[in-house]
Image (cartoon, coloured by chain):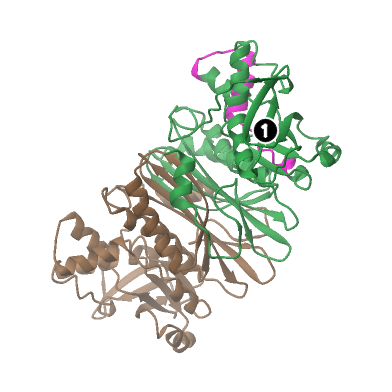
Chain colours: A brown, B green
Amino acid sequence: MSEFDLIAKYFTRQSRRSDVLLGVGDDAAVLQVSANRRLVAAVDTIVAGVHFPIGTDAAAIGHRALAVNLSDMAAMGAEPSWITLSLSLPSNDAQWLEGFSTGLFALADRYNVALVGGDTVRGPLSITIQVMGWVETDRWLTRGGAKPGDAIFISGIPGEAAAGLAAIQRSLPSAASELLTQRFLLPEPRVLLGRAIRSHASAAIDVSDGLLADLAHICSMSGCGANIELESLPQSHAMPGLFAAQECEQLALCGGDDYELLFTVPSERIVAVKAAIAAGVRCTPIGLMVEGSGVTCYRAGHAVPMTVRGYDHFAELR
Amino acid sequence: MSEFDLIAKYFTRQSRRSDVLLGVGDDAAVLQVSANRRLVAAVDTIVAGVHFPIGTDAAAIGHRALAVNLSDMAAMGAEPSWITLSLSLPSNDAQWLEGFSTGLFALADRYNVALVGGDTVRGPLSITIQVMGWVETDRWLTRGGAKPGDAIFISGIPGEAAAGLAAIQRSLPSAASELLTQRFLLPEPRVLLGRAIRSHASAAIDVSDGLLADLAHICSMSGCGANIELESLPQSHAMPGLFAAQECEQLALCGGDDYELLFTVPSERIVAVKAAIAAGVRCTPIGLMVEGSGVTCYRAGHAVPMTVRGYDHFAELR
C-alpha cells in the first residue's frame, strides 16, 4: 500500500463539519473562519536519512523544514502566517539547535511567519511543521481544477534539486554542483508566485515528488490527462556538465524536491498570468491538459514511453 | 538543558506579527483571526517507548495522540475544531492502522473535530497532531493569570494515570489495575470543563508533567507561589489496594499523564465556578495561591519538604 492509498483508506473521511471547505488530499486544507477570508493549514514532516542526508547542515535543515510547508501554502495561493514546530532530537546539541533555529527563523522572517507553538521530544532527528495561512474567499488553488486545453506551466528549472542531491551523494565537487546542491539544500518556496497566479490558474501543486508524478496528481484530481513537450522543458545550465543528457531529462521529469510550482492556466488567462508573474521567477509553458487521463510525454511530435516514478516513502528509502 | 530551557533559548522570540496574541510557552497559541473569535493552536507529539509503552494497543495510541492535544485546548478554554496528523510508521501494518484510526476518530467524533490534513513518513512509531480551535474574544485561559488568594482546583483524581502506567510496567493484573490502566491508556480531555471555567478561572494548565510540576508552571508564569494541603487531595479508590500510601501520594503529586485540569479561581468567583461545573467532572479545591514563588505542600498545617520532579523528555526516558 502506498502513502496515498494509506491516507485514502484510513484517514480520508467525509467531515461532518461544514466549515471544512477542502480536507485531506490536496496540498493543504481550506477552513472557513470568517466572512472575508479562509484559513489554510498544512503539515509536513522531514526525517534525517529520508528527506535529507544524515549530516546535512543544521541551518539547511531548519530552512528545509519550513520551506516544504511554505511551498504547500504557495500551491494553494495562500499567504503563510504562523507555524508550530515539533522537534524530535536524538540529543540536546546546542550547536545544532543554534544552526537549526537560525536557518528556520531566517526563512520565517523573510515571509513574516511567526513560530507560535512547539513541542520537543527525544528521538531520531525528525521535524514536523504545521503552517497556517490565509487566502481570500473568492479563489484558492487546488489540484482539481484543470480542464482540457489549459496550458501547463512550471516555475524554475525542474531537476536541479534532485541533481544537487545526486551531486552530494556522489561527491561531485565543482562550481556547478555547488549551485545544484544549494537548490537541494535551500529550496525557495514560491509563495509570491502562488499569490500572483491565485486568480488566474485553474490548478496548482508544488513539485515535491517529481514533475511527472505531481502532474499525475493534477490529472487524477482534475479528471483529465496531460501532454508534455519534452523540448519545452526549461534547461539547467549547471546539470549538463555533471550528468549525461538522458539523466538530465530523467532528473527533470522524476527528480523530487524542487518545490517549484506546477500549474495550469486556461487559454484566455495566459496573457493575464504572464503579466502577473513577469517580475518574479521564470515560468515555462511545457504542455497542455487534454481529455483522458495520465501524463504523456512527446518528443518531436511522437509519444515517448515514460515510467512515471515519483517518490513514495512507503516504496523506498533513500 | 531541559526541554523548557531549550524552547526558551532557541525558539521563543518576540514576534513581529501583531496577530499573535499569545505565542510559544503556554498550552497553546492564541491568534487573532476575526473580530469575534480567536484561533487557538497547539501541537503535541507522542513517541513509542517515551510517551506510551511499546506494544500499546493501536486504538489507545490513536486516542491518546488526540487526547493530549484536545487537553491543550481544554486548558485554554477553547473549543477544538480541526486537526492535522503527521504519522511516522516503521511499517505499513494494516491492522495497526485500522486500530489507530478507529481510536483517533472515535474521540474526534465525540468532540466534533475534523481531520483536515496529514503526512506519513517511514520511521520509528511517532505521532504528531496539531489541533486548531476557537475561543471567544473576551477571555481565554493562560498559565499566567493566577493571583495570591486564588483557590487551586484539580479535576478528577491526580495520580491514577501514572498508577495505571506503573500497573502495566509491573504487570499488576486486577480489577483495580484495570481501571487505572484505562485512565492511563484512554485519558479523557477535559474540553467541556475548560469551556465551563473559561469565564471564571484566573489561570489553567492541563496536568501532563505531574500536579506539582504543572502547578509550578502556573506559579512561575503568574509570578506567585502556591500552597497545597495534602489532606485535601482527592483520593483514588483503586490505588490503595495496589500501592503503599506513600507511593499513592507520590503518584498523585508527581505522576504525569493525567490530563486533568489544574486551575485557579479568584475567591469571588468560586460560587460561580462551582455552579458552572456542577454537572461535569468532579473538581476539588486543594490549596491557595500565595505571595512568593514555588509550590509548598502542607500536612496538618506543617510544610512538608517535597522534591518537585516533573517529567522532562530531556532528563529521562521511560
Q: Quadrant of residue A174?
A: bottom left
Q: Describe residue B133's horizontal placement relative to residue A247 as left or right.
A: right
Q: Describe residue A108's horizontal placement relative to residue B201 as left or right.
A: left
Q: Nearer the viewer, residue A167 or A175?
A: A175
Which residue is depicted at the point 27% across and 52% down? A56
Q: Main secondary structure of the magenta part?
A: helix
For label 1, the SS is: strand
> The disc numbered 1 marks a residue on which chain?
B
Q: Position of residue A8 (x, y in %)?
A: 50, 51
- Residue B179 within the segment the image draws in magenta: yes
Q: Position of residue B31 (x, y in %)?
A: 62, 59
Which residue is depicted at the point 37% across and 61% down? A208
Circle 1 crowding by C-alpha within 10 Å: few under 14, some 14–19, many from 20: many
Q: Position of residue A224 (x, y in %)?
A: 45, 70
Label 1 amino acid? Ala
The image shows residue B4, relative to residue A197, as above or below, that is above
Q: Is residue A139 visible from the viewing direction of this image?
A: yes
The image shows residue B126, relative to residue A189, as above or below, that is above
Label 1: which residue?
A: B226
Which residue is depicted at the point 68% across and 36% down? B261
Q: Residue furthest front?
A: B292
- Identify the image quadrant of the N terminus of chain B: top left
The image shows residue B138, relative to residue B18, as above or below, that is above
Q: Describe residue A153's horizontal placement relative to residue B85 as left or right.
A: left
- Write down the region rendered in magenta: B169-194
